Amino acid sequence: MTTAELTGAEEISWDLSDLYESADDGRLDADVEEAEQAAAAFRERYHGKVAELDAAGLAEAIAERERIESIFARTIYYAHLWFATDMADAPRGALLARLTETGAALDTQLLFFGLELADLDDERAEALLADEALARWRHWLRTVRKFRPYLLSEPEEKIVTEKSVSGVSAWGRLYEELLGALRVQLDGDEVSLEEAMAKLYAADRDERRRASEAVTDALEPGLRTRAYVFNTIVLDKSVDDRLRGYATWISSRNLRNDTTDEAVQALIDAAVGRYDVVQRYYRLKAKLLGLDRLSFYDRMAPIGEDPTKVSWGEARDIVLGAYNDFSPDTGAIVERFFAERWIDAPVRENKRTGAFCATTVPGVHPYVLMNFTGDRRSILTLAHELGHGLHGSLAMPLGLFNAETPLTTAETASVFGEALTFKRLLALEDDPQRRLNLLASRIEDSIATVFRQICMNRFEDAVHTERREQGELSPERLQELWLETQSAMFGDAVDAEGYGTWWSYIPHFLSTPGYVYAYAYGFLFALSIFRRYELEGDAMVEPYLEVLRSGGSKAPEELARIVGLDLADPAIWDEGIDALAAELDEAEALATEIGLG
Ligand SMILES: [Zn+2]
């Protein structure tokens, strides 16, 4: 946006003085020093002695470990937040760099604690865990120890780690370099893959088609090499999983995400069973764009750009209204973010792009950063980040270790808050065309977060399974598997001609195998709770807040039980998809109403 378009967000800057008055605040250096001294004392006292501690002694040690972490976290959060609003300012960069180094040194010094905890033999650990003195740390301790059954002997682990630098990490880096070197010949220019991909959002169909053809051409050279690198990384994972004894290719990822193979399978079954939702939407989108059928390159095409801008004040009122309607207590917490300057809102030069919520440390409060442009997307972004803020505010009394959530539940409150706000936004809009546009962009976000990720997980699953059972996969076979798994989702609603090699530009497949489903998991977990709230009303408020107050002190399965959901049951994931399908029903009805359907 240009500076002429004022939104009212220009003056909305955060006040970091709840962390420190300034970078020169003497308390900052005092805290760094305190953390360093406490870490040294901690090492002196506990190194090599963790196995000798009784339950009370261990509880004391964990509490001290957490205290050290909290002291240091306050300093590094300050550095990150201060830096984020002006990344070109040298003193800010210098403080962040200095504290990042200090943090790494502290980690190194304290690493032994986790290792010695993981090393406790099972019988001893169970006896300790049964002791009430350790009740507060049960989940945390189990989390620290959960990889224990899959660890190799110490010399083996050492070899694996050292050899990975010239092995799997080197292959990963090679792939990144190959991708980075790709150049796309587009309309007489040579552009990066990213620039070419951005054209898929163009309003002009011909521009999208040219961009997609240029990308397909650019992905052709070196495809055999990239397929080989992919094969090698997949093979490396299968060797690692076999040696460690993981049941399936995805098991280690599930463990890291604090969930079970059963829950993830139920999620996948539910999403795959509802691919019709995607097909219905893409058929509707074809109509809205005046096409017989979408091509894969039309999926991101804009529909009905909405020029209406909202002011910061309007956005605040909509979001606050949504949270207040849900529960006055929730509204009161969210209100504080505005009243007490916990938000940095304007678009500013050298500010970090995008949006985030930093939960900081117990005794302080979360901070929210965003770049408010005044479009409707910005309202939902604000609602999203304030959801994280609410979650952090409610969970932080548990302390740093118990408040921290795994990827699978980290998005619960943000997705829920976005859903609440979306409903309000929709209720405020009477114009059918604009209602339809709102719904369409919402459904597209959901499809990208849920179905597209599950569909990519199906491709990964096919590749990892086939590599294990039948050996190396040719580029042609990878293309077949990619098109098979994509077409399962597209049905006859999307033409995938030309899409066959596009698996090869997605870095997640190589850098973090199995990663993609977590987006769908977190999103549908939150939407399933939201659906229950829609059906049962206020009775769901308290259980939902209890989930947020529990932070990461319980596994997702346990959290789900608080709101009456069993994550191993595909029907539960279906409830989240029902919430999406209800939005699609309404979009279809609106399209018919305005003569487009
Ligand atoms: Zn988020």
Image (tube, helix red, strand yellow):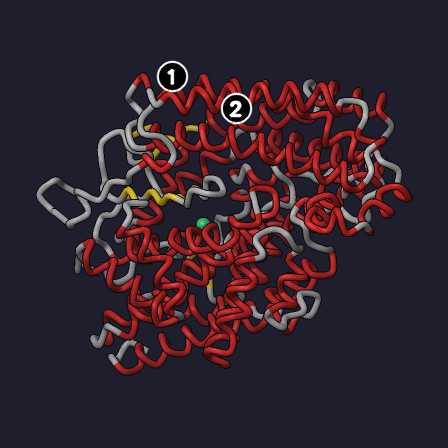
Q: Position of residue 581 (x, y in %)?
A: 47, 74
Residue closer to the observer: 257 or 242: 257
In front of the other: label 2 or label 1?
Answer: 1
In the rendered image, which residue does mark 1 sit on?
94
Residue closer to the observer: 77 or 283: 77
In the rendered image, which residue does mark 2 sit on?
177
Q: Is residue 479 above or below residue 290?
A: above
Amino acid under label 2? Answer: Glu
Q: Residue at x 42, y 42 (%)?
A: 364
Res 484 → quadrant: bottom right
Left or right: residue 546 compared with residue 418: right
Q: Quadrant of the N terminus?
A: top left
Q: Residues within 10 Å of mark 2 (few under 14, many from 20)?
A: few
What mark, if any, has residue 368 been given in the picture? none
Q: Is residue 301 above or below residue 16?
A: below
Q: Residue at x 65, y 25 (%)?
A: 169
Q: Residues within 10 Å of mark 1 (few under 14, many from 20)?
A: few
> How far separated are the C-alphas under marks 2 and 1?
29 Å
Res 303 → quadrant: bottom left
Of the image marks 2 and 1, the number of the one nearer the N terminus = 1
* Residue located farthest toward the left when viewing the structure as drawn: 4
Q: Position of residue 520 (x, y in %)?
A: 55, 57
Is residue 465 in view?
Answer: no
Secondary element type, mark 1: helix
Left or right: residue 242 compared with residue 24: right
Q: Residue at x 37, y 33 (%)?
A: 81
Is residue 555 in view?
Answer: yes
Secondary element type, mark 2: helix
